[in-house]
Amino acid sequence: MNQALKELLDLLDLEQIELDIFRGRSPAEDVQRVFGGQVAAQALVAAGRTVPPERHVHSLHAYFIRPGDPAVPIVYNVERVRDGRSFTTRRVVAIQHGKAIFTMSASFHIDEPGLAHQATTMPEVPGPEELAPFPERMRQALADMPEDSPWRELLARPRPLDARYATPLTWEALRDPSLSRSTTNVWFRYESELPDDPLLHVVLAAYTSDFTLVDTVLLAHGQAWGTPNVSGASLDHAMWFHRPFRVDEWMLYAQESPWSSSARGLAKGEMFTRSGELAVSVVQEAMIRVS
C-alpha cells in the first residue's frame, strides 16, 4: 500500500468524541483549503457509523458553506433524522471555529428486490493499460507552470489512487485550445487490495468524485486550476450509489459539463465498473471566476 493511501485511510478513521459526534483531521496543507472530497468522505464515515451495517448508503446531498481550515480538526455532528423499516436518514454538519463549513444529508436503504434496468452505456475509450498514468501526463504541464506557482508542489504530490485520462488534461488544453471539450473520461482505482467493507468503497468513491469533476467545466473553456486568473470553490455535491462496487478495481469516471454561466458551472459524472455496469451518478455545481 502506497504511503498516500495509508495516510488517506488514517484520515478517514474518525475519532468518536461523544455519541454521534466525531472529529477528523486534515493533512498539512499550505497551498489550498481543505479538499472538498475529504470533507464529504469524512462526513459519510460519520453518518455510516450511526447506521446498522445491513443498511447501505444510496444517496447523499451536500453543500460546501465555508472553506475548511487544514490547521484545525473538523467536528462532525450527526443528527438521526429518521430510522424507518427500509430507509434511514442522517444529517451531518461539519464545524470549524464554531461555524458550519459543510452540511450533508445521506440516506441508507436495506437490500430488497425491485425493477431493474440501465439505459446509459459506458463510453468507448481505451482501457487503462493503454493509457499513461497521471504523473507522466502532468510532467509537461509542470514544466510549463511558473517556477513560483504554489500549484507545482500540489500537482506533483503522490496520490492515493491511480488515475489514467482517456481525454485531455486541462493543462494540455490550456497550451492547445483545440483540445478543449466539455467531456472528461478517467479510469481510476486504488492500487492496494482494500477490505470488503462496502461503506469504505463508497466513501473512497465520494473522495474520488471531487478530484476531476469541476475540471470538466474548465476544460470546456481551455482553462486550468493553478493559473493566476482562475479561482473557484465547490458549492454543492450530490451522489447516488446504484449497486455494489470496488474501488480497488478499475472504474471509469465519465464526466460532462452541460452548462456554465454567472460565475457558476455544472458538471455531471457517472462511474462504471470495468464490465460497464453503472455504479454511481454524481452532480456538482461550482463557483468559477476567471479574471
Image: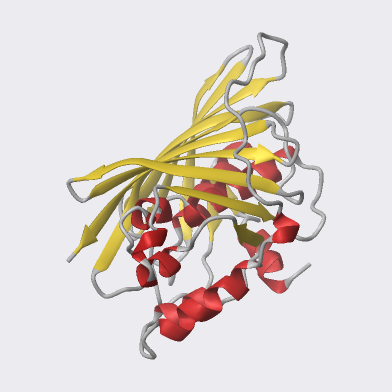
Where 278 sits versus 130, above or below?
Answer: above
What's the residue at 50%, 34% (across, down)? 60
**Is residue 190 visible to the viewer in this orientation of the structure?**
no
Query: Closer to the camera, 180 or 92?
Result: 180
Q: What sort of colour scheme is used for the picture?
A: secondary structure
What's the residue at 47%, 81% (across, down)? 142
Q: Percent position (x, y) of residue 31?
A: 40, 76
Where 152 sits versus 80, above or below?
Answer: below
What's the residue at 59%, 18% (across, down)? 87
Where 222 sits versus 126, above or below?
Answer: below
What's the residue at 58%, 20% (across, down)? 119
Q: Percent position (x, y) of residue 259?
A: 30, 40
In the shown orientation, is residue 34 left or right of residue 157?
left
Q: Percent position (x, y) of residue 121?
A: 61, 30
- Residue sitting at the far bottom: 147
- Residue sitting at the far front: 178
Look at the image and tell me in which quarter the C terminus lies.
Answer: bottom left
Query: Closer to the camera, 143 or 156?
Result: 143
Which of the 4 quarters of the picture holds residue 67?
bottom left
Query: Closer to the camera, 68 or 146?
Result: 146
Look at the image and tell me in which quarter the N terminus lies.
Answer: bottom right
Q: Percent position (x, y) of residue 207?
A: 56, 52
In the shown orientation, is residue 179 left or right of residue 18?
left
| Number of numbered discs | 0
Query: Closer to the camera, 16 or 186?
Result: 186
Where 284 sits versus 31, above or below?
Answer: above
**Is residue 75 visible to the viewer in this orientation of the structure?**
yes
